[in-house]
Amino acid sequence: MQEFLQNFDINEYLPAALAWATNILLAMLILIIGFWIAGKAYKMVHAIGKKYDKLDDTLFRFFGSIVRYVILAFVFIAVLNRFGVETTSIVALIGAAGLAVGLALQGAMSNLAAGVMLLIFRPYKVDDFIDSAGQFGKVTEVDLFTTILQTFDNQQIIIPNSQIWGQQIINHSHHEIRGVNMVFGVAYGEDTVAVRKVIDTVLAAHPHILKDPAPFVEVETLNNSSVDFIVRPFCHGEHYFDIRYSVPEQIKRALDDAGIEIPFPHRKVIMVKED
């Protein structure tokens, strides 16, 4: 032991020890500063999103997370460089792994891309009634991968965003005032002026039908066995379904009370007797 201490030269190992200690201190400093910058970047992106009411907050949280993880990736690469680790191969390996994962998750990535587009352009938002991907309901949640609808019979429908973004989207809640299209047929022998008067009376008595814009009531089609009136009252969006499912019965009763015939499809058959 004494011989070892006599042969041990501290000056020989001191530079290496100082270099390791310096690298450790610098690595810790890089980590601390890197985490601080990553956190600040996330908050900054999130704060930018709050300034734009038309853009969804979920989108900016996602972008903020991407920025944070990219910064942290560079921080860890810088730390490895401090200890002499060759990072070129590591970066290449991460890139190859990312490509493989991307190919394996093509469906998820398409949903993610569609979700980003939906959150940027916002063709609908939570609490809107939409018709898309063959489904109709109230939007309860929109995230980066799916849109969740609630139907009138209280079913929850989860639709991948890629199915919605690639198809027609009908937003029934986009405009505050909506028209409700209905068609009523009367017999050819009825007076169209009297029919219009009956319909106008029913519409004027409804509490949710607006006076301005005025309801539209006109003859639309001369059908095979009926004269068809198109009836389009206007209302606020929240009263649409109340009018859509209450007014037809009210008009039917009013026409019956007025003695106006509502025909059903029929054919006239002429029989010829041959001798």
Image (tube, rainbow, N blue to C red):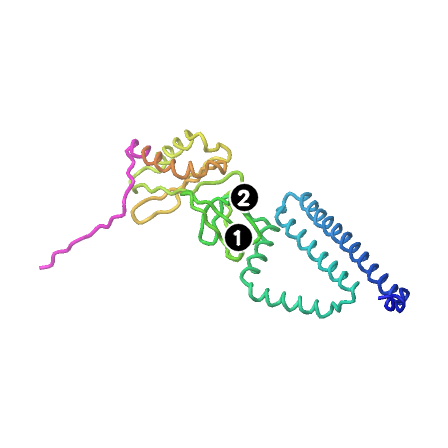
Sort mark 1 into few (<14), some (14-19) or many (20+) by Cα contacts within 10 Å.
many
Q: Residue at x 20, y 52 (%)?
A: 269
Secondary structure under the numbered disc 1 in the rendered image: strand
The reply, left or right, for residue 51 in relation to residue 113 is right
Q: Quadrant of the N terminus?
A: bottom right
Q: Residue at x 57, y 67 (%)?
A: 103
Q: Is residue 236 above or below residue 225?
A: above
Magenta part of the chain: 254-275
Q: In the rendered structure, does residue 48 fall within the stretch colored magenta?
A: no
The reply, left or right, for residue 188 in relation to residue 172 is left
Give, as a three-letter code, the residue at label 2: Val
Q: In the rendered structure, does residue 262 fall within the stretch colored magenta?
A: yes
Q: Is residue 150 above or below residue 3?
A: above
Q: Residue 22, how many percent across, how many down?
A: 84, 59
Q: Nearer the viewer, mark 1 or mark 2?
A: 1
Secondary structure under the numbered disc 2 in the rendered image: loop
Return the residue at label 1.
Answer: 146
Return the residue at label 2.
Answer: 126
